[in-house]
Image: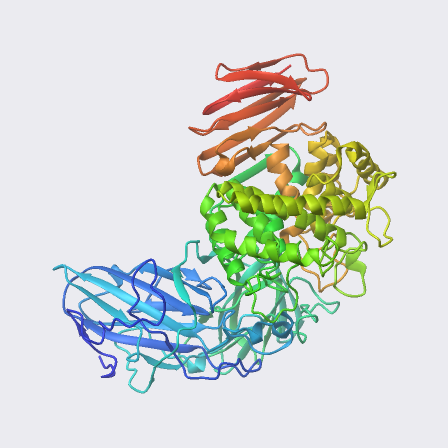
Amino acid sequence: MVVSAAAAVVIGVVSPALADTSSATAASAENDWTAKWIGRDTPQVAPELGKQNPAPLLRRAFALGKRVKQARFTIVGLGYYEAWINGHRVGDQVLDPPPSAYDQTAYSRSFDVTKSLRGGDNAIAVTLGRGYLSTPETTPTTLFGLSKAPWTQEPRLLAQLDIVFGDGTRSRVVSDGTWRITDGPTRDALYFGESYDARLARPGWTNASYDDSAWETARVQPAPTKQVVPADMPPVKVTETFGPAGVTRLTTNTRVYDFGRTTAGWARIKVSGAPGTTVTLVYGEQLNDDGTVFQSAMLGPAAVTHRDSYILGGKGRGTQTWEPSFTRHGFRYVEVTTSAPLTSFGIEARVAHTAVASTGRFDSASPLLNRINAIQRASLLDNMWGIPTDTPWRDRQGWTADAYLYLDSAALNFDVEGLYRQWLRTFRDSQRADGSLPVIAPNPGGFPLWNDPSWSGTLISSAWTHYQYYGDTGVLSDNYPAMARWLDLMRTTIAGTDGLYTGFSFGDWSPPGAENAATVALRPPEGSLLTANADLYHEARLLARIARELGHSGDAARFDTMADALAEKFNETFLDADAGVYHTPVEAGYRQTSNLVALAYGLVPEEHRDAVFANLVKDITDRGDHLNTGAIGTKLLLPVLTENGRADLAYKIATQTSYPSWGYWVKQSATTSWETWSMTKKDLSMNHPFLGTVDDWFYQHLAGIQAAAPGYGKVLIAPVVPDGLRYASAQVATPRGEVSAGWRQEKGRLTLRVKVPAGTPAEVCVPLPDGARSVTADRGATRVERKDGHVVYRVQAGTHVFRVS
């Protein structure tokens, strides 16, 4: 073997170089860092697209003179990394670490690598990608401010290998100025794709025997972040691989592969041909009229925003297999163009997302409802990749309202406890010194919109919702200072505007018809003033509850006072008491969401509630039992109808198949939830879960499973049984164990079966269909009362069956 003298060291005890106790960053909770941040000395401004530096390769060779009992490798590779020890890949995670406000927090991951080490020569090898850390200057990154982020710099590495020998002694290999560095064959940009020139590959560079003497010495760099903390959420992993459903030949050297469904990840190719031949892959969700793959003109030049390329290497390589390492695409179609004919070519889709466990299941007698649930589940997964995003195809941002709106759906289907807890840290890390909160998180500071109650204020509603599902008050206490600072800022702000919020808000984004506007701005015709103030009221009430939960009684009183004043001003401004309707000064006809937020948040004075609700029902029925809501109103519509005695109407809306409806998506062969109610423009996203929140209703109302106390400390089972649906059931894995509920109606009988985990009291509201005479229950159920068309029982752990004749 040949290694450079600078890189090789024999380890039996800790050498002085390895024992350096100065740290480049705050100590990790997982272990104390003695490693240094390393990388290239390069400008702190990302170059233009196509001119960015190659992804660096870094190595550290070392020798071991003792038997290894245990070894643990901890790494932070910004923006992304892949690592090997003696040629063995460290872990199976991809696109790691998760995005964050890098200047505030970076996430580490630790791996047991005992089996990868051996006596004698060893080597650690790492390659780094850019991710969100360093984004080239062009349209989308200018739009979101990513290329001007305060953390922008070349990729950086912090790593250490902790070794325990068989005799009990310990040693450590750390990233420092003894590592070697050189250019790799990859140039990557998260927003635009990745190129790999196999002619520049360095075979064997991850192995101990590789000669790195011609490489440069890596330079110690200033810490790019204030703190490093262990990632406590699952990593992104490749979860599925499948082949195309069809292929269309456009020209001699261009083919379009249809994978049959919309997904997120990338393509893996297997190719052979002449060295220097370039294979270009363009990804997209839709096709142009000429059959080529559409690229978003809104976020960059055509055929740039999702494009990978591979240049074949030298002779004797045979079939070459390649897939990108540091980018991710939303796609159904991949357009493949080659610069010269190939000897052979194969392609398959690689699906990658945060590896959350599936913890919920919904089923019913309706294939339509089951299909809607399936496409929402697919969209949820496609938008989990270290942070919850809006779409993997266009923006690829942590839009804060999107993440909140689909949090219920995500938590009912998957274990998102760690994902959201960690993202909430990124949300609060993005807060400005004056208390302002962003509308996207992580926020690089360059995006001009802040303090929208319907977006920024979801720090409060997301933390509260997380607490309801998982019961961890730590999420409330961790985020409380940031939430309180923001709400106090908003309290001061509205004091100067006659008691109402009058600034910018996105409003009830993406209502029916908005997709036909001249631009892709999907704002509602009534404006955003009403929803912004309703959301601000709701957030003030929630934060008052959180303050009481945490023992901050003075704060709770202050926030309740703010909410009381907002409610009074809200009704004074927006309620037409004679008509029983809420509306804004903008003439836009009856708007369902304007009335839904008032009903859902308890803003309607009691004497007007029946009239306001009746007018909502009338508008729905006048529209042929159709919704007319954007993302905010859609989440509220079916629950408000159900909780006010019109579950029948909610079911009619849920099962519509004409525009606008979820069933219309299904009829249009949707495989994921859409950004809008129709796809009249190709710039719109076909993988956008914030309108798919009917899925909440499937679990919480149709099957009837609800957390009646935080973390399902108490459970409420209250299903609705619509005419025309034979059965529905759901299961949810809660912190206390599995909760399930399922009902079936046939031959004039209704049977409800409920399962409750140990130590969890539950209340079961057995529905009484018209003509029902009696309810029978097993011995474990205690009848409490009969009310509102239900018989209410209390039950403890176990399975319980209720029969209605």
Is 751 left, or right, of 584 in this rendering?
left
Picture quadrant of residue 96: bottom left
Vertical order, 268 against 702 (above or below): below
Q: Position of residue 392 (x, y in %)?
A: 59, 61
Res. 374 in view = no
- The C terminus appears in which quarter of the rendering? top right
Compare residues 321 and 688 and report the one nearer the observer: 688
Residue at image location 50% in from the left, 62% down from the top: 429
Is 239 left, or right, of 692 in this rendering?
left
Residue that lies at the very extreme toward the bottom in this rendered image: 214
Residue that lies at the very extreme toward the top in this rendered image: 773
Residue at image location 77% in from the left, 34% down from the top: 609
Is 214 left, or right, of 468 in this rendering?
left
Coloring scheme used: rainbow
Compare residues 163 and 753 and report the one nearer the observer: 163
Q: Position of residue 430 (x, y in %)?
A: 54, 63
Residue at image location 54% in from the left, 79% down from the top: 278
Q: Position of residue 103 (x, y in %)?
A: 47, 69
Counting the numbered discs, the total is: 0
Vertical order, 271 against 678 (above or below): below
Residue that lies at the very extreme toward the front in this rendered image: 554
Q: Position of residue 74 (x, y in %)?
A: 33, 63
Picture quadrant of residue 401: bottom right
- The N terminus appears in which quarter of the rendering? bottom left
Vertical order, 645 against 277 (above or below): above
